[in-house]
Amino acid sequence: MLEVGKLYSCSEYFLLLFPDKDTAAATTTAADLDPLAAAVTAIAAAYWTRELGKPVSFCDPETPLLVLSVKEEYIQVLAGDKVGWIINEDWLNIKEIVV
Protein backbone atom coordinates (compact mmCIF):
# COMPACT_ATOMS: atom_id res chain seq x y z
CA MET A 1 0.00 0.00 0.00
CA LEU A 2 1.27 3.46 -0.89
CA GLU A 3 1.54 5.97 1.94
CA VAL A 4 0.63 9.66 1.93
CA GLY A 5 3.66 11.94 1.95
CA LYS A 6 6.11 9.40 0.50
CA LEU A 7 7.82 9.45 -2.90
CA TYR A 8 7.40 6.60 -5.36
CA SER A 9 8.37 5.74 -8.91
CA CYS A 10 6.88 3.59 -11.62
CA SER A 11 9.95 3.03 -13.77
CA GLU A 12 8.32 0.66 -16.28
CA TYR A 13 5.17 2.50 -17.34
CA PHE A 14 3.76 5.81 -18.45
CA LEU A 15 0.80 6.56 -16.16
CA LEU A 16 -2.43 8.30 -17.03
CA LEU A 17 -3.29 11.10 -14.57
CA PHE A 18 -7.02 11.53 -14.10
CA PRO A 19 -8.51 14.77 -12.71
CA ASP A 20 -10.47 13.00 -9.96
CA LYS A 21 -11.13 9.56 -8.44
CA ASP A 22 -14.45 9.07 -10.20
CA THR A 23 -12.90 9.72 -13.60
CA ALA A 24 -10.09 7.28 -12.81
CA ALA A 25 -12.67 4.68 -11.80
CA ALA A 26 -14.31 4.99 -15.23
CA THR A 27 -11.36 3.27 -16.94
CA THR A 28 -8.15 1.36 -16.39
CA THR A 29 -5.23 1.67 -18.80
CA ALA A 30 -1.45 2.12 -18.85
CA ALA A 31 1.18 1.97 -21.57
CA ASP A 32 4.32 -0.02 -21.03
CA LEU A 33 7.75 1.38 -21.74
CA ASP A 34 8.55 0.62 -25.37
CA PRO A 35 9.48 2.81 -28.35
CA LEU A 36 5.85 3.82 -28.94
CA ALA A 37 4.76 4.11 -25.30
CA ALA A 38 4.76 7.92 -25.10
CA ALA A 39 2.74 8.23 -28.31
CA VAL A 40 0.32 5.50 -27.23
CA THR A 41 -0.14 7.14 -23.82
CA ALA A 42 -0.69 10.58 -25.35
CA ILE A 43 -3.34 9.09 -27.63
CA ALA A 44 -4.96 7.29 -24.67
CA ALA A 45 -4.99 10.54 -22.66
CA ALA A 46 -6.62 12.39 -25.57
CA TYR A 47 -9.15 9.59 -26.03
CA TRP A 48 -10.17 9.53 -22.36
CA THR A 49 -10.30 13.34 -22.25
CA ARG A 50 -12.81 13.27 -25.09
CA GLU A 51 -14.79 10.27 -23.79
CA LEU A 52 -15.01 11.44 -20.17
CA GLY A 53 -15.26 15.18 -20.84
CA LYS A 54 -12.50 15.93 -18.34
CA PRO A 55 -8.79 16.57 -18.87
CA VAL A 56 -6.64 13.43 -18.64
CA SER A 57 -2.85 13.83 -18.81
CA PHE A 58 0.07 11.49 -18.26
CA CYS A 59 3.54 11.27 -16.75
CA ASP A 60 6.60 9.37 -17.94
CA PRO A 61 8.47 6.66 -15.99
CA GLU A 62 11.17 9.10 -14.84
CA THR A 63 8.68 11.30 -12.95
CA PRO A 64 8.69 10.86 -9.14
CA LEU A 65 5.23 10.50 -7.61
CA LEU A 66 4.41 12.22 -4.31
CA VAL A 67 1.35 10.57 -2.77
CA LEU A 68 -1.24 13.16 -1.67
CA SER A 69 -4.25 10.94 -0.93
CA VAL A 70 -5.23 7.25 -0.97
CA LYS A 71 -8.78 6.00 -1.63
CA GLU A 72 -8.66 2.22 -2.08
CA GLU A 73 -6.70 1.55 -5.29
CA TYR A 74 -7.01 5.19 -6.42
CA ILE A 75 -4.01 7.33 -5.52
CA GLN A 76 -3.84 11.12 -5.83
CA VAL A 77 -0.29 12.12 -6.75
CA LEU A 78 1.84 15.12 -7.55
CA ALA A 79 3.78 14.06 -10.65
CA GLY A 80 6.17 16.81 -11.64
CA ASP A 81 3.98 19.89 -12.08
CA LYS A 82 0.73 17.89 -12.45
CA VAL A 83 -1.73 16.69 -9.84
CA GLY A 84 -3.89 13.73 -10.76
CA TRP A 85 -5.25 10.35 -9.78
CA ILE A 86 -3.66 7.05 -10.81
CA ILE A 87 -4.98 3.54 -10.45
CA ASN A 88 -2.58 1.47 -8.35
CA GLU A 89 -2.43 -2.00 -9.89
CA ASP A 90 0.01 -4.60 -8.49
CA TRP A 91 1.55 -5.20 -11.92
CA LEU A 92 2.67 -1.53 -12.14
CA ASN A 93 5.44 -2.36 -9.66
CA ILE A 94 5.39 1.10 -8.05
CA LYS A 95 8.32 1.35 -5.62
CA GLU A 96 9.17 3.78 -2.83
CA ILE A 97 12.05 6.17 -3.51
CA VAL A 98 14.38 6.08 -0.53
CA VAL A 99 16.29 9.33 -0.08
Image: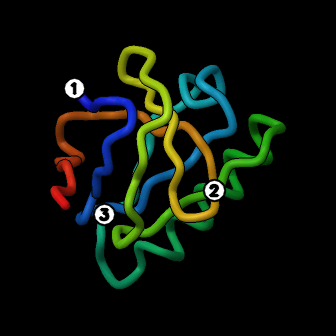
Per the rendering, the mark at residue 82 is 2
In the depicted view, which residue is nearer to us: 4 or 58? 4
How far apart are the alpha carbons under marks 2 and 3? 20 Å
The vertical placement of 54 against 72, above or below, is below
* First in residue order: circle 2 vs circle 3: 3
Q: Residue furthest top?
A: 72
Query: Is label 2 in a helix, a strand or a loop?
Result: strand
* First in residue order: circle 2 vs circle 1: 1
What is the x, y in percent for residue 70?
Answer: 42, 22
Q: Residue furthest right?
A: 53
Label 2, residues with CA under 10 Å away: few <14, some 14-19, many ≥20 = some
Label 1: which residue? Answer: 1
Q: Which quarter of the figure is the N terminus placed in?
A: top left
Per the rendering, the mark at residue 32 is 3
* First in residue order: circle 3 vs circle 1: 1
* Residue type highlighted by circle 1: Met
Query: Is label 1 in a helix, a strand or a loop?
Result: loop
